[in-house]
Amino acid sequence: MAKLTIPSRHKAGIAKLRGLDEKAVRDLRESLDKVSATVNPSEASLQLMTLDSDKAIPGLKEIRSLLVSLYAIKSTHEIPLDEFVNDVCDAIDESSDSAIAFATDDERRKFKEVLATLLDAEPFAMATKAYDLQTEGERTFCDARILTDLRPVFGKDIASGPAGMVIIHRLKLGYHNSEGEHRTFYIALDAEDLVTLKKAIDRAELKARSLKSIVKDVPFLGIS
């Protein structure tokens, strides 16, 4: 695996995580174990925010963002937990930010123990791996919208007004590229195209239901 670097957006999460006491780490691990494995990581992280609200975990917002990212990286590269934890700590060691760099070997050892505890929650790992498999590709769907307009059609005598009208549809597709950047593009559609698109979606949904009816003894994970 390529050498890890610590993005600026996750440095606060690392600092918050290093400030947790043993009880907060145990509470956080218990919450990770209770997250449903049948949702995607974004929904799982929202569950993490709402579970056990009586347990006050300082900096939970920053920590959950960090954990989602670490679980995703670990899932993508499929490396052993001990090796991954070492890679993360090496990246922190090489960081020039004094707010997260280890001052002593003991600090590094304690943080490795915390990471090993929090990155070994099976339900959260399963949700992340399922999502990674389903969204693997150069582009990942984000959102869609169909814009419908009336366009005038003019004859030779423009001054007399439109000779007719045409209904124009534009399918706006939003996606994330392999770098996580959001992009959009448009496709022109007519009435027949809408029917074709609807049939394709209906057929895909039917195939999904059929597959689920065949594989009854295995749970479906992620965004199925």
Image: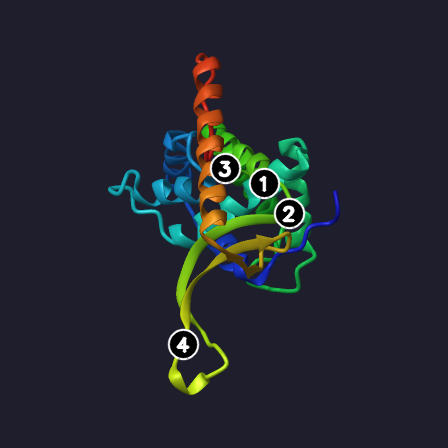
Q: Residues within 10 Å of mark 1 (few under 14, many from 20)?
A: some
Can you identify the residue that label 1 sits on?
112
Quadrant position of residue 136: top right
Amino acid at the residue labelled 1: Lys
For label 4, the SS is loop
The kind of residue on which mark 2 rests is Cys
In the structure shown, which secondary structural element does the residue marked by tag 3 occupy?
Answer: helix
How many residues crowd mark 2 within 10 Å: few (<14), some (14–19), many (20+)?
many
Work out whether 181 lies above or below 154: above
Cα distance between the residues tagged 3 and 2: 47 Å
Q: Is residue 18 visible?
A: no
The local secondary structure at tag 1 comes to helix
Residue carrying label 2: 89
**Three-letter code for the amino acid on which mark 4 is drawn:** Pro
User: Please, which residue is most extreme toward the bottom here?
Assistant: 159
- For residue 156, which numbered disc appears in the image? none
Quickly name the residue at label 4.
Answer: 162
